[in-house]
């Protein structure tokens, strides 16, 4: 079929909306009419070149939700009309990582930046109208009016819940919420610092509050985001990590925060070092944000890591299990215990995707969402 989508033709570059040809779904695939897609910083990392994909042009978007319009032959368990949220990391349910409860590390994730089908490496679902193959970011490509995905990338959700909000469960919520609940293992009564209050960081605030932290200290230089942080459970908000660390020490007998979540849009080594300095003995720094893939080195003393037994923990998708956690978070939203409506600052049309990223860089949005 013919559809439209936002692609990056080269890096560094920007998203432009073009006409696309889209294959019909094969066995194990779903054709989906998009309803909404979040504007995640990770897609911008592809445009800037911080995160390289294997092929250009590349169709962006990985945080999306829609309605199934077609089901590939021999694909049981799915029907036209199903509502789905995409998991930007697929889960096969069979590899070692899935079997050990680490679905976010599924072996199919090896193809996340390749752009081709998971099980046919010479095949691309999207093409330009001249026949040029178009890579599909993270196997999803939610910056298009229609897409085709592997069933391993889709989670079926209740049809009465709004997909224009549930789309956020496909990345921002799980990544941020899980960074606190799973990767940091926040416990009741603890003190947590969250650096960066975009879509990921604000959900790390939610996760820390849900886990029972007594002090949830939010950090962001943008005043608007600091003002919004208490809505999601922050007890304090500061412009700098130094202010946050001082407060953490004042409420922990000088020890420091139990955990610090680094959810800054573009992470550098000094951000991690600041987080390490802000935590207590045996505390945990969770690195959730991304940066230039070529940047190496963190200015942290090995002596400090060793003698104070501090831990630096990386996480992808918040160490969550998308097949179960997306459903759990949808239930929390239904019960009024997880805030999704409040995360969406601005809605855009597909043709406004570039403006959406301009607003993100300007600090105007917690999360921008494309509505189709």
Image: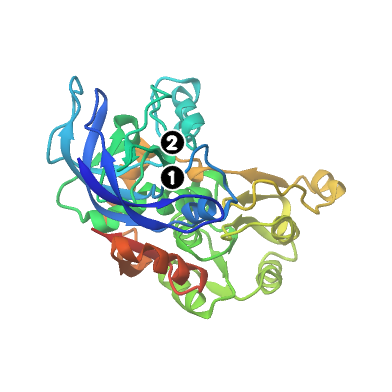
Q: Is residue 340 in view from this perspective?
A: no
Kindly check if marks 1 and 2 are in contact, taking CB atoms under 8 A apart as contact.
yes
96 is higher (above) or lower (below) than 175: above
Furthest residue in direction left, as rendered: 80
Q: Is mark 1 on a helix, strand or loop?
A: strand
226 relative position to 266: left or right: left
* N-term-proximal mark, 1 vs 2: 1
- Quadrant of the frame with the N terminus: top left
Residue 14 vs residue 213, the one in the foreground: 14
Residue 194's spot in the image, x, y percent?
57, 62
Residue 133 vs residue 223, the one in the foreground: 133
Q: Distance between the residues labelled 1 and 2?
A: 7 Å
21 relative position to 258: left or right: left
Q: Name the residue under label 2.
A: 115
Furthest residue in direction front, as rendered: 130
50 is higher (above) or lower (below) than 217: above
Residue 8's spot in the image, x, y percent?
45, 51
Crowding at mark 2 (Cα within 10 Å: few <14, some 14-19, many 20+) = many
Residue 154 lies in quadrant: top left
User: Residue, x 49% and y 61% (percent of image)?
Assistant: 205
Residue 348 lies in quadrant: bottom left
Q: Which mark is residue 58?
A: 1
Residue 128's spot in the image, x, y percent?
33, 43
334 relative position to 196: left or right: left
Residue 279's spot in the image, x, y percent?
70, 57
User: Residue, x 51% and y 30% (percent of image)?
Assistant: 110
Q: Is mark 2 on a helix, strand or loop?
A: loop
Furthest residue in direction right, as rendered: 303
């Amino acid at each position: 079929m013919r559809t439209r989508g936002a692609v990056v033709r080269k890096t560094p570059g920007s998203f432009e909306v073009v006409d696309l040809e889209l294959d019909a779904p094969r066995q194990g695939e779903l054709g989906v009419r998009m309803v909404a897609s979040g504007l995640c910083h990770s897609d911008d990392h592809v445009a800037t070149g911080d995160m390289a994909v294997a092929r250009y042009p590349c169709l962006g978007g990985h945080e999306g939700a829609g309605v199934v319009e077609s089901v590939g032959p021999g694909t049981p368990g799915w029907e036209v009309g199903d509502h789905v949220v995409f998991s930007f990391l697929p889960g096969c349910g069979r590899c070692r990582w899935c079997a050990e409860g680490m679905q976010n590390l599924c072996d199919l994730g090896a193809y996340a930046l390749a752009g081709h089908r998971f099980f046919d490496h010479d095949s691309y679902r999207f093409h330009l109208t001249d026949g040029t193959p178009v890579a599909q970011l993270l196997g999803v490509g939610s910056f298009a009016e229609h897409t085709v995905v592997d069933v391993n990338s889709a989670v079926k959700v209740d049809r009465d819940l709004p997909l224009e909000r549930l789309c956020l469960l496909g990345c921002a919520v799980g990544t941020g919420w899980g960074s606190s609940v799973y990767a940091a293992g926040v416990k009741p009564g603890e003190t947590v610092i969250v650096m960066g209050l975009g879509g990921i960081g604000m959900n790390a605030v939610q996760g820390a509050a849900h886990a029972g932290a007594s002090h949830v200290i939010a950090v962001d230089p943008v005043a608007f985001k600091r003002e919004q942080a208490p809505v999601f459970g922050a007890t304090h908000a500061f412009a700098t990590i130094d202010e946050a660390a001082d407060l953490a020490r004042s409420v922990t007998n000088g020890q420091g925060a139990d955990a610090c979540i680094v959810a800054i849009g573009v992470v550098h080594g000094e951000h991690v070092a600041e987080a390490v300095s802000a935590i207590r003995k045996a505390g945990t720094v969770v690195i959730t944000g991304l940066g230039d893939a070529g940047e190496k080195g963190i200015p942290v003393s090995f002596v400090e890591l060793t003698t104070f037994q501090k831990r630096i923990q990386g996480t992808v998708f918040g160490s969550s299990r998308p097949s179960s956690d997306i459903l759990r978070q949808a239930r929390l939203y239904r019960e009024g215990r997880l805030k999704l409506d409040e995360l969406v600052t601005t809605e855009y049309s597909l043709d406004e995707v570039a403006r959406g990223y301009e607003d993100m860089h300007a600090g105007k949005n917690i999360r921008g969402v494309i509505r189709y």
